[in-house]
Image (spheres, rainbow, N blue to C red):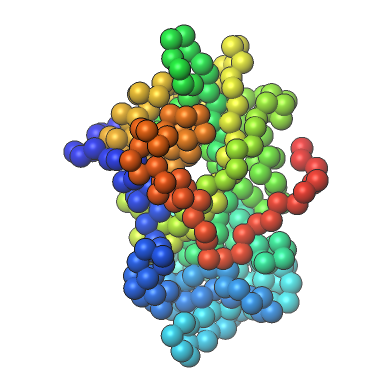
């Protein structure tokens, strides 16, 4: 892991991960971006559900199942179909064709894993292959589980950090949460945490079900960055469900699926140094900052940008997001 030549502040870390223009802070930049990108629409749904770059629109223009409206300041592209199944079929055929054509580098990351797109009424409007999701600029969902321990002589908890494998397609060799992963069509967040905990760290499902505690969400909106395979003009609004769990004394973390090289227990000071040096995956830096706020590592006496950081960790996204159903059974 090579170190950056300049140290990052905590606000620098937020700006790096949340770099799509914010209308309240840069209205001109936001308007220019929104006039450039096409609104992604679905028939009979009032709100746009994503934004699509003109280079992607040009590829979709010649494929059946898409309708363009290029009048006015805000252009749009609509996926055609009366229900989830028909729209998902259009989207699946479209991106399979584009992958076979080889015109978009981002599609080289094909995972055979479907991401859901939610409408305002919490209905899944359609699903899209994970590698293609950023081509449609739709809200993506993930989960994080921070496993921590209190060590002798330390006021604050230490966190089990993972190092991503050198063979992982994105953010290879960077540091990440104990457990992190994607939220798939048909899952709820708790199910995703249980699955990913086993896949990433060999943590027993029954332990995660009994001990993992929900800690809210973070949200941000960013361009594909230098660590990711793909076209850098593509954008990803994201919501991450946050969980944490205190490790029992006999817990053994073991890489399970080849995506993690090792796990190490890092104290707060070591984590702070790694953040400043840019060793962590950018979105995980936000997860760590949120953990620090929850556990009192960051407060108004220790962080000059405390208010801005706290507000930016939960950016209001411009598209419909998943609604969590009260009383739903999780397994």
- To which quarter of the image does residue 175 belong? top left
Instruction: Please tell me which residue is depicted at 58% across the width and 68% down the height of the picture.
Output: 49
Instruction: Please tell me which residue is depicted at 74% across the width and 72% down the height of the picture.
Output: 83
Classify 293 as above or below 319: above
In this view of the protein, which residue sits in the foreground, 298 or 231? 298
Question: Residue furthest toward the top?
Answer: 152
Q: How many marks?
A: 0
Where is residue 94? Give x, y as percent.
56, 70
Question: Residue furthest toward the front?
Answer: 301
Relative horizontal placement of residue 84, taking residue 233 as reference (left or right)? right
Where is residue 238? Give x, y as percent.
51, 54
Q: Quadrant of the C terminus?
A: top right
Where is residue 119? Give x, y as percent.
66, 66
Instruction: Please tell me which residue is depicted at 67% across the width and 71% down the height of the picture.
Output: 87
Classify 72 as above or below 55: below
Where is residue 147? Give x, y as percent.
55, 26
In this view of the protein, which residue sits in the foreground, 100 or 223? 223
Question: Residue furthest toward the bottom?
Answer: 71
- To which quarter of the image does residue 231 belong? bottom left
Determine if residue 143 is in view. Answer: yes
Determine if residue 169 is in view. Answer: no
Instruction: Please tell me which residue is depicted at 72% across the width and 65% down the height of the picture.
Output: 121
Q: Quadrant of the N terminus?
A: top left
In this view of the protein, which residue sits in the foreground, 78 or 239? 239
């Amino acid at each position: 892991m090579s170190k950056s030549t300049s140290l990052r502040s905590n606000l620098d870390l937020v700006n790096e991960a949340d770099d799509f223009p914010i209308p309240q802070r840069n209205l001109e930049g936001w308007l220019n971006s929104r006039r450039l990108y096409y609104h992604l629409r679905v028939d009979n749904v009032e709100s746009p559900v994503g934004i699509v770059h003109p280079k992607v629109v040009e590829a979709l223009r010649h494929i059946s199942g898409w309708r363009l409206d290029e009048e006015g300041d805000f252009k749009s592209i609509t996926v055609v179909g009366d229900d989830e199944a028909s729209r998902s079929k259009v989207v699946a055929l479209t991106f399979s064709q584009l992958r076979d054509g080889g015109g978009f580098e981002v599609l080289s990351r094909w995972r055979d894993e479907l991401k859901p797109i939610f409408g305002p009424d919490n209905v899944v409007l359609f699903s899209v292959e994970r590698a293609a999701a950023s081509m449609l600029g739709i809200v993506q969902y993930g989960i994080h589980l921070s496993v921590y321990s209190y060590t002798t002589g330390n006021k604050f908890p230490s966190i089990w950090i993972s190092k991503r494998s050198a063979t992982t397609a994105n953010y290879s060799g960077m540091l990440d949460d104990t457990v992190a992963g994607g939220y798939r069509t048909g899952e709820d967040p708790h199910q995703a945490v249980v699955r990913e905990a086993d896949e990433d760290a060999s943590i027993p499902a029954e332990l995660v079900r009994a001990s993992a505690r929900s800690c809210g969400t973070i949200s941000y909106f960013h361009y594909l960055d230098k660590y990711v395979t793909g076209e850098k003009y593509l954008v990803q609004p994201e919501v991450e469900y946050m969980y944490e769990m205190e490790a029992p004394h006999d817990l053994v973390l073991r890489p399970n699926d080849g995506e993690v090289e090792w796990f190490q227990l890092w104290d707060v000071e070591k984590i702070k140094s790694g953040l400043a040096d840019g060793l962590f995956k950018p979105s995980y830096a936000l997860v760590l900052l949120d953990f620090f706020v929850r556990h009192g590592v960051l407060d108004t006496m220790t962080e000059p940008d405390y208010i801005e950081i706290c507000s930016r960790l939960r950016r209001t996204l411009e598209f419909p997001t998943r609604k969590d159903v009260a009383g739903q059974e999780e397994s």
